[in-house]
Amino acid sequence: MLTLYNTLTRKKEEFQPVHPPQVGVYLCGPTVYSEAHLGNARGPVVFDVLTRYLRHLQYQVRYVRNITDVGHLESDADTGEDKMEKAARAARIEPMQVAQHFTNRYRQHMLGLGCLPPDIEPQASGHIIEQIQVIEEIIANGLAYEVNGSVYFDVPKYDEEGKRYGKLSNRSIEDQMANTRAGLEGQSEKRSPLDFALWKKASPEHIMRWPSPWGEGFPGWHLECSAMSRKYLGDLSDIHGGGLDLMFPHHECEIAQSQGSHSHTDEARFWVHNNMITVNGTKMSKSLGNFVLLGDMFKGPTGPLAFGYSPMVVRFFLLQAHYRSPVDVSDDALQAARKGYRKLMNGLRLLDRLTADSLSGEVIRDRTVAPLAEGRQPDTAAGDAELRKLVADVFVGLNDDLNTARAIASLFNLLRKFNTLAATTAAMATVSSAALSEAVDAYRAVVSDILGLQDEPRANAEELLKLTLEFYTEAKAEKAYDKVDVIRAALKSQGIVIKDTKAGVEWAYSEE
RNA sequence: GGUGACGUGACCGAGUGGCUAGGUAGAGGUCUGCAAAACCUCCUACGGCGGUUCGAAUCCGCCCGUCACCUCCA
């Protein structure tokens, strides 16, 4: 049974869907005004594994990952220029063009990292009507007020009603009041410094603006997720997540908005937060400038990294730590991860052989039974039990708050067993083909389907072809025509024909 | 200041009071035409000081150190 750590209750809870077998999952997606960095990838990778595992558990998952293309203000105060607009102005293009560009880049990188596309990928700008609707509900409930064409959420009033603003991040409204920064004063429109904007009036120079009951403007920081989560996952979804740094204020505000609207829920039953990626122990972030862009990281070198690392190595690296632990990036750690990843992939190839052998039953039986006396069947009880234990351990890890680090450790133990079995016929005789095939299926399922780790072909086809042509030329020089024919036929089966020209041996794609 | 984490062997990184985490690196060995891979063995650590306990990396206290959130941030 899967347990998940719920930030809302601060403990691990058994996962039960609100409406089984459906499961609604929402991940706060990227703000598409710049290139994604490694830190931006962790949430999507973790939630990709989570949704893959939920599907493996036979749940019908609807996975929503939004695109924030509006609504993030640049300055500390609730005023200032939208990040999209700022980027657009700098590049002298349409804001939507900026959004589209980085959305495309983001999708490309996420696919490379093995993240399956979400079922719904809603854009904030496409849900202005829904957001206005939520604001109207909150106003109707007396928890928001309009000033000068802007609408603010009334945090103190909400808190007075016993809703407890701060329940997610575990902070009291008194403490928050006491710790209000001096720099944040001067937002005269707000009744309380804790209030946050639901709708902001657009200043004349603002490009991204929409009509509303309060005049032309744009939605506030936290509204889109509440509105879109409700639209696609209902009043109460199952799992809502994002980085730890979104817990406050973003997710806290989301809960307030949902409680304050007609939904009257915490928006999601489970609030799940992944920890940060650090560089030399310090959080990777755009503002600190110590980030490693995904595109650069795949090519390398960049920033603190002297080498490039493939997307799958990066994915494996992230999954080797538990999602609630911080992970520090370094060449040492990534190089170790690369070897581990390749080991796991070699295991996948070994399984193809193991399965092929088991399928041709005679081969296995001959090999395994041969050393035994006539008429005796090998005793596989102990071997089978051991194999099944190794498989079970993998799922123990996954079920324990999606502890991929433990699951991977168990996979390596299972892999060692496979390697031992494959080494000798005597070893192979210690397990039944039924138990073996179960274990093989489990390994494949976990590595490929759940952890989403695919083999990355590292061989260069061009180089291999060149090598083959050298053998061809050699064989031809030796007049070893049988070899020549074999090579020619093999290449032809790959759609490639060899052309003997006066200048030398060349190749072309077969036109047949 | 408030809230919350964390300090594990050369490196990364799991650890639910007693049972080998795992990966990488290193040493030795088996196998091998040479290698590689694989397998076996070794290197067996928990910031410090106290306490609870038959027993603590794991619980409690204090101290030292690091980090995150409290402002947009995954």
Image: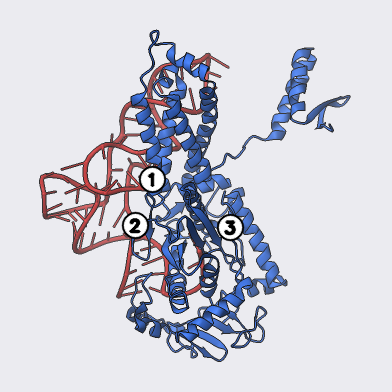
Q: Give the CA separation, mark 3 to mark 1.
A: 26 Å
Q: Secondary structure at mark 1?
A: helix
Q: Could you say which chain is coloured blue in the image?
A: A
Ranked by sequence position, the earlier of labels 3 and 2 is 2
Q: Residues within 10 Å of mark 3 (few under 14, many from 20)?
A: few
- Depth check, front residue: B42 or A324: A324
Which numbered tag is attached to residue A12?
2
On the image, the x and y values in percent for residue A357 come to 53, 22
Residue B58 in the image: x percent, y percent?
Answer: 24, 52
Identify which amino acid the numbered label 3 is placed on: Asp
Q: Is residue A308 visible?
A: no
In the image, what residue occupies the spot 67% across and 67% down? A98
Q: Amino acid at mark 1?
A: Gly
| Residue A119 marker | 3
Please identify the quarter of the rendering in which residue A295 is found. bottom right
Protein chain holding label 2 = A
Mark number, residue A478:
none
The Cα–Cα distance between marks 3 and 2, rounded to whole angstroms, is: 27 Å
Q: Earlier in the sequence, mark 2 or mark 1?
A: 2
Which of the chains bears the disc numbered 1? A
Q: Are marks 2 and 1 on the same chain?
A: yes
How crowded is the residue under tag 2: few (<14 C-alpha within 10 Å), some, or many (20+)? some
Q: Residue at x 55, y 25 (%)?
A: A356
Q: How packed is label 1: few (under 14 Cα within 10 Å), some, or many (20 or more)?
A: some
In this view of the protein, which residue sits in the foreground, A126 or A405? A126
Indicate which disc residue A397 carries: 1
* Pointer 3 chain: A
Location of residue A77 with respect to A57 vertically, above or below: below
